Amino acid sequence: MTNKKKIFIYLLMLILLVIVMFLFSLMYGSSKISFVEILKIFFGSVDNNNEDIVVIIKQIRLPRTIMACIVGSGLAVSGCVFQAILKNPLADPFTLGISGGAALGVAIAFVFGLSSITNFFIPFCAFVGMNISVIIVYLVSVRKKFVSKTMILSGVVVSYVFSSAVMLLFTLSPSNNVQTAFVWLMGDFSNFDERMLPFITIVVSVGIIILSLLGNVINTVCLNDEKSKTFGINIEKNITFLFFTASIITAATVSVCGIIGFVGLIIPHAMRKIVGTNNMFLIPASAFFGAFFLPLCDTLSRVLFSPVLIPIGVITNIIGGFFFVCLLLKSEGIHIK
Amino acid sequence: MIHINNVSVNYLGKKILKNISCDINKKDFLGVIGKSGVGKSTLLKVLCKLIKPNSGSIFIDCKNINCFSRTNFAKIVSFLPQYVDTSLSFNVFEFIMFGRYPYMNALKIPSGEDCVIVKKIMDFLRITNLSQRKINELSGGEKQKILIAQVLAQETEVIVFDEPNSHLDIGSQNNILEILRDLNENYNKTIILTLHDLNIASEFCNRLVLLENGSICSQGHPKEVLNYVNIERVYNTTVIIKTNPISNKPYVIPVSKQQK
């Protein structure tokens, strides 16, 4: 079918973009390293006097770029899934209160000085906090048979309650802890722990592969509930599974690099414009585009005002917003879901 | 073939259906009529296993419908609800393919056979030219055909429609009902539907069930059900019943109060 061919060409183009972006991200930064040198570092022999470059590439830029790719695709895919199960175009990975849970976990860790115990404790606390908020939203939703309005409302309420708890904690604690917790939450690639990389990579990529294979199941979830039931589909079971898979992906990304907004909202929309609503193609396309978009923003954040590093959230919002307005104006209106 | 035995449904403390009993034979074209809110849709949903009755039971081929798994039931009975969300920008082929879900594996990836069946159905309904169009860009009549195609893709013996021709012009209405009649006569499908238009019900159905306040007021051939005593009582209005000179079936003309 011509339609399918077209989509495969788009997907191939996206993969190419990701590879090009990956190399770009390795080349540019506060010091520029040429393409040939990068190839030498990975495949050939390196001159001894170039050891600085090896350190920059292998220990700083490579993990950072991989992390940006993984986080970008993870957020894009879970945004896609949340928009489908909530049947709402404004949903993103943080709609259901994940950010509130993460904030509370991190706040508790910093305020009580748990961060000094071990470096892994902050991500761990964030992860636990997120899971608590996700489980609360789930328990409310399951009683209301996953009606999307109740799910969104309970998510928003949980978020508010958790952020108020964070505020309470901050007002009662010394100020320097508050500052570090806030910076952590803003979303940043500059100081994540490299040892977390394999764990996050595995969790997010397994999650993305599962969701990509389930594209057709996700499709049914966005139909009318009654109609899906007559196709013999167990909607509640499917939503539960998708909800937890997407939440775990989001939680994994947030626990290493904080809350990066906007990626999970605009990438699914942008891809929907290009490959259509069918989640079979939308999920992989979003994953690839996320893996292109976040390294791009990260590189820009390093290069634009170097040596000053801009928080990545600022870049994603500006570029994303500009790009999205262009998309909106170009076509006659968004088709949602 | 279908045996509805003493079914009652309560919703929010109100009795929606009271002791409904009814037999539906194979190859019936059964119309359910009655005032709005009388329980027509509820009856269909009970029949399609979407609502559990508070008492009573339903048997298909002597087997209680609660004994069917959801997937197996979807291979026997298909249902087109009054409202289906068609705002999604799926293309027509993908959308009809949803009807093949009961036959697919856990990952729901369509097989070659599924594609062949969907194409055959699109040929049958003459909508092959719409195949790559987006469903949210189609007209009401076209959408209704796509939804029927989706239901047909389920390849079930029993097909249940909840007001298949509401919001359509008279041409599209007849078109849709002719398709259903063709399915009933030439493909041995058992068709159960609710209708508001009594004349269409009389013209196309071979059996009617008239509901009043959650129980059956009258059932049988249109000639037996559609008499002015029944209609005036159930609908609380004044009508004249005539006979259609071509099909020899009754038709109902409303009378305004001024004329009386």
Image (cartoon, rainbow, N blue to C red):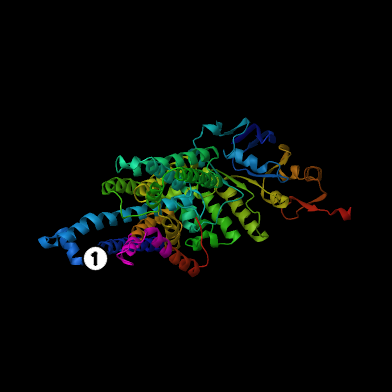
The chain to which mark 1 is attached is: A
The image shows residue B29, relative to residue B131, as above or below, that is above
Is residue B246 at all visible to an observer of this figure?
Answer: yes
Three-letter amino acid code at the position of disc 1? Ser
**Which one is nearer the viewer's eye here, A273 or A49?**
A49
Q: Is residue B194 rendered magenta in the image?
A: no
Q: Is residue A313 magenta?
A: yes
B238 left or right, relative to A55: right
Q: In the picture provided, is A310 more to the left or to the right than A329?
A: left
Residue A205 % position (x, y):
32, 49
- Give the overall secondary structure of the magenta segment: helix
Q: Which residue is mark 1?
A: A31
**Magenta span of residues:** A295-319
Percent coordinates x, y for residue B29 in the rendering: 63, 45
Depth check: give the residue in front, A251 or A1.
Answer: A251
Secondary structure state at the residue bearing disc 1: loop
Residue A144's x, y, as percent?
55, 40
